[in-house]
Amino acid sequence: MDFGSSSPGRPPRVTASRATSAKIVIAGGFGVGKTTLVGSVSEIRPLTTEAVMTAAAIDVDDASKIPGKSTTTVAMDFGRITLDEDLILYLFGTPGQTRFWFMWDELVRGAIGAVVLVDTRRLADCFAAVDFFEQRGLPYVVGLNCFDGVQPYTTQDVRDALTIGQEVPIINCDARGRESTKALLISLVEYVLRLRGAAPAGVGS
């Protein structure tokens, strides 16, 4: 691997032409933690399109099970993380409400894989995202976002409820924690590499 010049005490700089970038989509239901996930792990200030929820949305967006939820993503979230010396991930968070799903086809264009973030208290909210990626043949992993430090269901419980194959990784995570979110993204990259027949060892280590 070629590196650019470096100064004593500083890590070597990766030559730009040798760096590999990949697009990852973060999807899931309304209020599941997608914006939080992107913000927790992004090494740049994330771009968000949060809008304040108004009275007009009361009959459209059910926030009764999401205490304190006052804003919602209306276009996308965007962040970036360098997973390895020469691997940069660009993260695109999708809006969760059904009325914004027309944007999903554009957001997933060119993506190597996706994370379906799940709140197990509202498991049905992620069905549409799982169906969307399966229909398009896009590899995905399922992240079980842990709310209030409690995860009442096992990964097998969720797998059975979603009727997804044993090959799809299901990982407990905390969307607020950088290391937890990073581990989730690494799991996705390794899964994609396995599907492509490449060796996943060493990613992010």
Image (cartoon, rainbow, N blue to C red):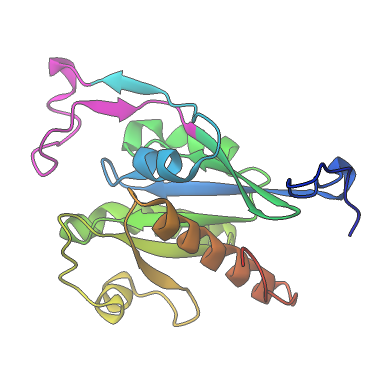
Left or right: where does residue 40 sit relative to residue 190? left
Q: Residue at x 59, y 62 (%)?
A: 137
Left or right: where does residue 195 sit relative to residue 34? right
Left or right: where does residue 9 sit relative to residue 188? right
Highlighted range, magenta: 53-77
Q: Position of residue 195 (x, y in %)?
A: 66, 74
Task: Let me know if residue 123 is in the magenta part.
Answer: no
* Picture layout, residue 72 above or below residue 200: above
Q: Nearer the viewer, residue 158 or 39?
A: 39
Please, which residue is most extreme toward the front here? 8
Q: Residue at x 14, y 36 (%)?
A: 63
Q: How many marks?
A: 0
Q: Which quadrant: the C terminus?
A: bottom right
Q: Position of residue 112 (x, y in %)?
A: 65, 55
Q: Position of residue 1 (x, y in %)?
A: 89, 60
* Picture layout, residue 99 above or below residue 125: above
Magenta span dominant secondary structure: loop
* Picture layout, residue 67 above or below residue 132: above
Q: Nearer the viewer, residue 66 or 181?
A: 181
Which quadrant holds residue 39?
top left
Q: Position of residue 128 (x, y in %)?
A: 36, 53
Q: Nearer the viewer, residue 9 or 188?
A: 9
Which quadrant holds residue 40?
top left
Left or right: where does residue 76 sit relative to residue 34? right
Q: Residue at x 31, y 45 (%)?
A: 33
